Image: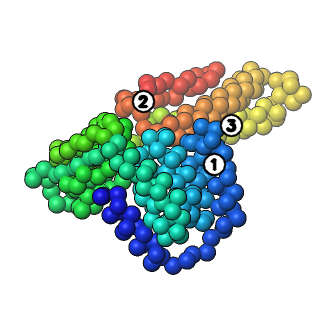
């Protein structure tokens, strides 16, 4: 009786549907491919071709081939729908043999259908969403024994502020189950971590190497410049007192030696200045470092300059 009622409703719907443009030639080709695959026992491969043929040009013959393949691969709920559609369309087209075949197959399949009834607990909130195998079920589907394929099914209950509650169940052919669903526990919302203060480049502490290095560089340049000028003056005096490299007196010879010493001091000072600038630049680009007590001093001797420091 249930199948007969469904067929009558489907028949009325088909009579009311307007004719739509299709592609009968492509539909026949897809039907032929699907039929050959089905005859070879390859129903999983045949179903997409049969479904495409049905989309291009809905025919009762296509529906029964599709339903037969779906039944063989275990898609019993889909097969039932297509058997009912085939019966209605065959009746509308006056194809009695196909109508009788669809009716007999639908009646035989009916007891094999698994049915699942989903109900919500009384404590479930109103905004709850129920998904069965990834498909959202509306309120009219809750509490109704709906046909499903035999096998595993996943039920997910979602609600705002709640953890998703997932239920997995297994149904055999002809088995019926009633499952009461509820929402999951309250979701724990992690408090956002306080923002980490970002220090601007102007607030970044400078490494002591910056001050030490550039301080040494400044001192080296100053000393080198002064001693260099003094060495040039002593050199002019030595040229006058010792023409052709021969000194007439001990005083003239001492002036020559003093000029040479000042020249070496100037050279070493400029070298020290370069080294200090390099240290300062490293400290500047390397960023702030661990604070340490630092000091530096430059001492000059008759034969050179001595850099003393603690870093």
Residue 251 visible in the displayed image: no
Query: Label 1 belongs to which residue?
Result: 35
For the point 51% across and 47% down, which residue is it? 68
Residue 88 visible in the displayed image: yes
Work out which residue is located at the far right of the displayed protein and give it: 244
Give the answer, above or below, for where 44 lies relative to 54.
above
Query: Label 3 belongs to which residue?
Result: 228
Question: Which is more N-terminal, label 3 or label 1?
Answer: 1
Q: Is residue 11 left or right of residue 179?
A: right
User: Can you give x and y, in whole percent of width and height, for residue 17 in the image?
Assistant: 48, 76
Query: Label 2 belongs to which residue?
Result: 295
The residue nearer to you, when weighing 49 against 60, is 60
Q: Nearer the viewer, mark 1 or mark 2?
A: 1
User: Can you give x and y, in whole percent of width and height, for residue 57 in the image?
Assistant: 60, 66
The residue nearer to you, when weighing 296 against 259, is 296
Give the answer, above or below, for where 140 lies relative to 73.
below
Q: Nearer the viewer, mark 3 or mark 2?
A: 2
Secondary structure category for the residue under label 2: strand
User: Can you give x and y, in whole percent of width and height, for residue 46 in the image?
Assistant: 60, 46
Q: Is residue 87 left or right of residue 26?
A: left
Question: Which is more N-terminal, label 2 or label 1?
Answer: 1
For the point 60% across and 31% down, which residue is it? 275
User: Can you give x and y, in whole percent of width and height, for residue 263 in the image?
Assistant: 70, 30
């Amino acid at each position: 009786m249930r199948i007969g009622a469904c067929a009558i409703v489907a028949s009325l719907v088909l009579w009311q549907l307007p004719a739509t443009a299709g592609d009968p030639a492509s539909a026949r080709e897809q039907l032929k491919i699907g039929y050959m695959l089905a005859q070879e026992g390859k129903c999983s491969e045949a179903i997409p071709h049969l479904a495409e043929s049905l989309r291009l040009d809905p025919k009762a013959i296509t529906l029964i081939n599709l339903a037969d393949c779906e039944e063989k691969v275990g898609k019993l709920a889909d097969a039932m729908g297509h058997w009912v559609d085939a019966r209605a369309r065959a009746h509308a087209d006056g194809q009695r043999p196909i109508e009788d075949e669809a009716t007999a197959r639908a009646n035989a399949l009916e007891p094999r259908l698994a049915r699942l009834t989903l109900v919500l607990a009384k404590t479930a909130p109103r905004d709850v969403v129920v998904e069965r195998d990834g498909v959202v079920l509306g309120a009219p589907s809750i509490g109704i024994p709906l046909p499903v394929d035999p096998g595993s099914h996943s039920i997910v209950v979602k609600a705002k502020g709640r953890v998703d509650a997932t239920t997995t169940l297994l149904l055999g052919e002809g088995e019926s189950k009633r499952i009461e669903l509820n929402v999951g526990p309250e979701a724990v919302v992690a408090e956002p971590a306080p923002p980490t203060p970002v220090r601007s480049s102007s607030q970044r502490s400078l490494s002591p190497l910056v001050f030490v290095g550039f301080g040494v560089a400044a001192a080296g340049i100053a000393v080198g410049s002064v001693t260099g000028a003094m060495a040039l003056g002593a050199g002019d005096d030595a040229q006058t007192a010792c023409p052709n490299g021969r000194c007439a007196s001990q005083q003239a010879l001492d002036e020559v030696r003093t000029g040479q010493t000042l020249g070496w001091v100037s050279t070493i000072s400029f070298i020290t200045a370069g080294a200090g600038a390099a240290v300062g630049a490293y400290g500047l680009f390397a960023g702030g470092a661990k604070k340490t007590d630092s000091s530096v001093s430059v001492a000059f001797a008759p034969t050179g300059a001595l850099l003393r420091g603690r870093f």
